[in-house]
């Protein structure tokens, strides 16, 4: 999901603290609200919602001779009520759509949990992701990270977003369409099958461009996950991404997401 960001020049002050047995320079910006958009930002998705974290409003530490933002600080800014120990990162997505889960030698390294999150750093100008004291292969050090997917420790890992499907895997031209009320739609089941062939999936949430999701509505969260034959009754307009359902389901309006930006799925047990 992309949101417009506005640049604000900030004047920082420096202090020194001892961390992990060595001195680190910590630079604190004057404006301490990291959820205000400014400069380069990263979208953090958690529990069906998202937060835009501005990197230049977070403190930096010196890592490999350059200022970096700690990955744990990014999560703390987006999800302040959850200790890092209770969170795990299920995926990172770069501006070109790349994610570690696309590589077999990195897929098994996710989710990232606990002390390993504390070893992650993001360069605030390039948004490049780096790690300290890990044996991670190159596919874990993504360039220009724009999205981070987070869940509670021990949760089921959601799969790729529809944004990744758009840019890397699937083009709408490959799908057959069906006319509903004189409008052409692609079947939701066809989109999921093209992304994850042969998998029995359930949809745990849909995310709109404004961050809205059915799971965030009391009228709809009881209707998730969407499984089996119900998935077959879902349709997406390929021109605008609007999600609709067969009228026989009598779903409330909160299940009709306009401009779907993400689809979160799990493999059925």
Image (spheres, rainbow, N blue to C red):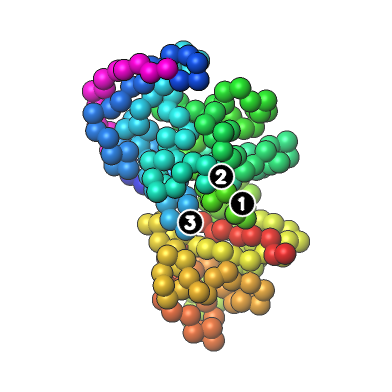
- In this rendering, is residue 59 above or below 53? above
Q: How far across and down, in percent of the image, does residue 121 sit?
A: 49, 28
Tell us which disc is closer to us: 1 or 3. 1
**Distance between the alpha carbons at the discs numbered 2 and 1:** 8 Å
- In this rendering, is residue 28 above or below 168? above
Identify the mark nearer the N-term, 2 or 1: 2
Mark 1 vs 3: CB contact within 8 A: no
**Distance between the alpha carbons at the discs numbered 1 and 3:** 13 Å
Task: Looking at the picture, tell me which residue is in the foreground, 196 or 35.
Answer: 35
Task: Looking at the picture, tell me which residue is in the foreground, 258 or 158.
Answer: 158
Q: Secondary structure at mark 3?
A: loop
Q: Which mark is on residue 88?
A: 2
Task: Looking at the picture, tell me which residue is in the foreground, 258 or 171.
Answer: 258
Residue depicted at 42% across the width and 65% down the height: 216
Q: Which residue is mark 1?
A: 154
Task: Looking at the picture, tell me which residue is in the foreground, 190 or 11.
Answer: 11
| Residue 33 visible to the viewer | yes
- In this rendering, is residue 268 above or below 142? below
Mark 2 vs 1: CB contact within 8 A: yes
Residue depicted at 45% across the width and 20% down the height: 19
Magenta-colored span: 6-18
Q: Secondary structure at mark 2?
A: strand
């Amino acid at each position: 999901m992309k949101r417009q960001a506005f640049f604000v020049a900030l004047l920082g002050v420096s202090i020194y603290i001892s961390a992990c047995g060595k001195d680190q320079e910590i630079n604190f910006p004057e404006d301490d609200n990291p959820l205000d958009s400014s400069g380069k930002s990263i979208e953090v998705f958690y529990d069906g919602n998202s937060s835009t974290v501005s990197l230049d409003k977070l403190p930096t530490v010196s890592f490999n001779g350059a200022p970096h933002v700690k990955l744990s600080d990014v999560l703390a800014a987006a999800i302040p009520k959850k200790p890092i120990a209770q969170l795990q990162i299920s995926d990172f997505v770069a501006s070109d759509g790349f994610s570690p889960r696309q590589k077999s030698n990195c897929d098994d390294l996710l989710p990232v949990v606990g002390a390993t999150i504390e070893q992650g750093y993001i360069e605030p100008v390039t948004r490049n992701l780096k790690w300290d004291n890990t044996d991670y292969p190159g596919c874990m050090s993504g360039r220009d990270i724009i999205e981070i997917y987070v869940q509670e420790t021990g949760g089921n890992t959601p799969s790729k977003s529809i944004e990744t499907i758009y840019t890397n895997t699937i083009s709408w031209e490959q799908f057959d369409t069906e006319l509903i009320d004189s409008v052409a739609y692609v079947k939701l089941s066809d989109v999921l099958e093209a992304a994850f062939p042969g998998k029995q999936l359930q949809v745990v949430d849909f995310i709109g461009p404004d961050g809205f999701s059915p799971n965030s509505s009391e009228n709809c969260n009881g209707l998730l996950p969407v499984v089996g034959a119900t998935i077959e009754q879902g349709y997406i307009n390929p021109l605008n991404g609007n999600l609709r359902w067969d009228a026989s389901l009598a779903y409330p309006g909160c299940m009709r997401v306009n401009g779907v930006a993400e689809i979160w799925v799990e493999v059925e047990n």
